Image (spheres, rainbow, N blue to C red):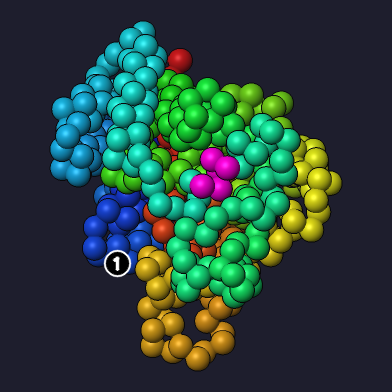
Amino acid sequence: MMPETSESRTFTLGMVLVAWLVGLAVHVDTALALVTAALAVCLAAMLLPPIAVVESLSPRAAARLVAVAVATQVAALVVTASAVAWAIGLVGVLALAQILDLRRLRAPLIVVTCAVFGLVASVIVRSAYQDPRIDVYVFQQMGAEGLLHGIDPYTPRYPNLYGPDTPVYGPGVLDAAGRLTVGFPYPPASLLLVLPGYLLGGDVRHADVVAVAGSALVMTMAGQSAWAGLVAALFLLTPRVFYVLGHAWTEPVLVFTFSLVMLCALRWRNALPYALGLFFATKQTAVLAIPLVPLLLPPAQRWTAAVSMTTKALIVAAAVTAPFVLWDAHAFWRSVVQLQFMQPLRTDAISHLVWMHARWPEQPLLWWIPFIALVATTAAVLWRSPRSPARFAGALTAVNLAFVAFNKQAFSNYYYFVIATACWAAAAAVPRRA
């Protein structure tokens, strides 16, 4: 069952509800309404006082609620992957066994659960998503292959899969002949982390599968309790996990580096700046966590320590990134930074900005809304949050969710990271069982 928490039960269960709602949102047609509900719950859990009726729930009742949430996700996965339904069901049974008093068997069971998940995910990815027609997969496959042959991954040489008139790319991304004018669009750490998957199995998605299973394993081991195991199961079996893995989005490795940050924050603080640096170097959106670093400090530590920790982390991120910048600074800048501002509004995004643009298409202030939401949410969570790893993960959940929910690009992969940070917030809210 759920031990007594170091955070309020309102915060802890609120983060569980956020992860469940966002997972459901990217799985059904009423997505925007569910995302809005998740954002409301997240902000309430972070900013408002604890709710008496939630605080009165027993630890066993709280754990059962999470188990029910996991069971609904398993059911959704089984329905959408009927060919391997029995295998997904097996993973679900193994994951739900975390609610039992397993004692010394807890660690071996989560290892077995993650290993079986990895096997099932690999089969689904290679069968249901054998050749995904998506540029992210091509970028990573060709980038890994090129890097192994000494070719700069940021050199524009990637094919345009969508045709010359595609709405996927903004003005300037394609030349007159319809060819891409940018290279690999992510920081180099994301490519280096999937390189073993390509090197050993010919497919970068092998590394993504390991990253997801490894993140769930780390989440459980960090808490070593039934509660941590159940929350890790909630993350592991979110309804769109195979969809995200099959399309080779970079969020699985981003989640893994964030999991290393949380593990270090909870168990190995001396390594925390280095884990933060790797996290910052993995994807552009990781920089949203920089203002939140003070929440990782112990309550008695001065805020100047946050400057020192952030500086060390940025030096690590720069050390990982610098060789690729020096290789071709212009190509790197255009691919990693400039491209982000060239991308168009996607009308298929799960975003309030799409709804607003459909009604006020000529309103120029709309493009500032995601940044206004970002600044306002960051300020609010820093103002109201006590310092702890759980609150850091919760604050990053709120900031990312607000930013994505009002952005021009808001798809399953962006929300997948929100699910992971919410689960980490809930897992870290409960002290480690001796």
Q: Looking at this view, is 163 or 309 the one in front? A: 163
- x then y, percent, for residue 296: 63, 40
| Corner quadrant of residue 370 | bottom right
- x then y, percent, for residue 180: 60, 62
Q: Is residue 156 left or right of residue 58?
A: right
Query: How many numbered marks does the figure carry?
Result: 1
Q: Is residue 145 left or right of residue 28?
A: right
Which residue type carries mark 1? Ala
For residue 29, above or below residue 126: below
For residue 339, above or below residue 368: above
Q: Residue at x 39, y 47 (%)?
A: 132
Q: Residue at x 56, y 34 (%)?
A: 194
For residue 408, above or below residue 392: below
| Corner quadrant of residue 40 | bottom left
Q: Quadrant of the N terminus?
A: top left
Question: Is residue 139 in the magenta section?
Answer: yes
- x then y, percent, for residue 204: 50, 35
Q: Looking at this view, is 395 or 182 the one in front? A: 182
Question: Is residue 332 in the magenta section?
Answer: no
Could you tell me what secondary structure mostly forms the magenta stretch? helix
Residue located farthest toward the right when viewing the structure as drawn:
326
Residue located farthest toward the top when viewing the structure as drawn:
104
Q: Is residue 127 visible?
A: yes
**Which residue position holds label 1?**
33
- x then y, percent, for residue 50: 39, 52
Q: Is residue 398 visible?
A: no
Q: Classify mark 1: residues with Cα within 10 Å, few (<14), some (14-19) or many (20+).
A: some
Q: Quadrant of the C terminus?
A: top left
Q: Looking at this view, is 399 or 315 the one in front? A: 315
Q: Which stretch is magenta? A: 138-142
